[in-house]
Amino acid sequence: MIRNYTILIIIILILLVPNIEVFAEEVAASHGVGENNISDTGGEADIKKEVSGQQVYEYYQAIKSESGTQAAVIAVATLVEPILDEYAVFGLHKPAALAQLFMESSFLSSRLSREGNNPYGIKGTGYLGATNEYIDGKKNVLDLPFEAFESFEEGVRGYCRLMMDKRYLPVREAYNSTDAAKCIKECGYASDPHYVGDGNIQNRPILGILDNIKAYQLDQFVRNPLDPKIRYKQIWRDISKQTGAQFLAYWYLQPRIKEIQSELYSLGYYKDKIDGWFGQQSEASVIVFQKQYGLDADGVVGIVTYEALFPEKFIAKIVITDTGEELTALADNIGQSQR
């Protein structure tokens, strides 16, 4: 009799175990944790590249409820800073970029940020949304197409790549975030007359880039890796086929061109001299590389082609600590610490 009960219990356990495993997987999935987005870092569950705009918004709200808006802003700024750092070496101004992130996304609450992973309101295709546009000084609400990104990280990178476009060269040339903010507006990023602001937030609404930098202490992220005296040599410029005169005029591009030629040579695409002159052979080798990697085959080394050539320089991830006690402790630490 006892033996029969034992057999019955074993059968019941066999039937239940798969259901228990499925239940555990569903719980993990409900918290945004899955097999593809967990990194083993000594027992801590970290959500990596697959982080969505909705998850970042929830993270922001969780810290805000624990330690206030200031702490939540700094926490999210700290999340995205490693990505911004990869482009700061080419002229990106981090305080201005961070202020734009919170402004454009309405502090991460906009549907475009939460659902389209586009916190910067970048125009494109894939997502139709309402936006405020100023025409002849008058505010108009228009339905326009916006870009939709696969992840929040890609949305941030999309902004960084946009800032590397030749249209925004004056932004990269700016010596500080104040000048950069003015150039962002002048280059046509936004039509709002209050988009820049003046940084004077005493008894005034917080509107523009400079106001948000001041109000949320985003200037603590100013750590600019570029020497102002030689900034023009270091900022990003697209590399395209040069004439002899251009080779001499843009002599400061030679180190970067040599770097590109060397990499193409090591990959077997380039067979000529590594001389810092981006001529016909260099252009031809870039076209072959671009075709191989599914890029626009125009022979120009823009930031996307450069990323493909040097993927090891663009490996930063957005990491969100798992919810619960760890998140509460993080919020407390951010709220109490000074960077």
Image: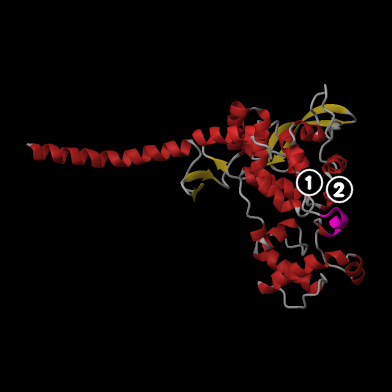
Callout 1, which amino acid?
His
Secondary structure of the residue carrying tag 1 is loop
Q: Earlier in the sequence, mark 2 or mark 1?
A: 1
Q: Are marks 2 and 1 in contact (CB under 8 Å)?
A: yes
The quadrant in which the C terminus is found is: top right
Instruction: Reply above or below: 89 against 209.
Output: below
> Residue 332: where, in percent of width, then height?
59, 32
Q: Amino acid at mark 2?
A: Ala
> Quarter-wise, where is residue 114 in the image?
top right
- Total label count? 2
The image shows residue 55 at horizontal and vertical percentages of: 58, 36
Residue indicated by mark 1:
93
Q: CA distance from mark 2 to mark 1?
A: 9 Å
In the foreground, 65 or 154: 65
Which residue is drawn at the image coordinates 64% and 27% (left, top)?
68
Coordinates of residue 49 in the picture (x, y in percent): 58, 47
The secondary structure making up most of the magenta span is: helix
Please give the name of the residue rendered at 62% of the width and 28% of the height, measured from the top-left corner.
67
Taking depth in this image into account, of 290 and 119 the one nearest to the observer is 119
Q: Which residue is mark 2?
A: 174
Outermost left residue: 1
Can you see residue 324?
Answer: no
Q: Which of the pair 228/84 is nearer the observer?
A: 228
Q: What range of the chain is rendered magenta?
A: 227-233
Snapshot quadrant of residue 245: bottom right
Q: Is residue 25 above or below residue 40?
A: above
- The residue under the point 67% across, 60% down is 308
**Position above or below: 248 against 135:** below
Q: Residue at x 62, y 38 (%)?
A: 53
How crowded pointer 1 is (Cα within 10 Å; few <14, some 14-19, many 20+) is rated as: many
Q: Which residue occupies the foreground of this view, 101 or 279?
A: 101
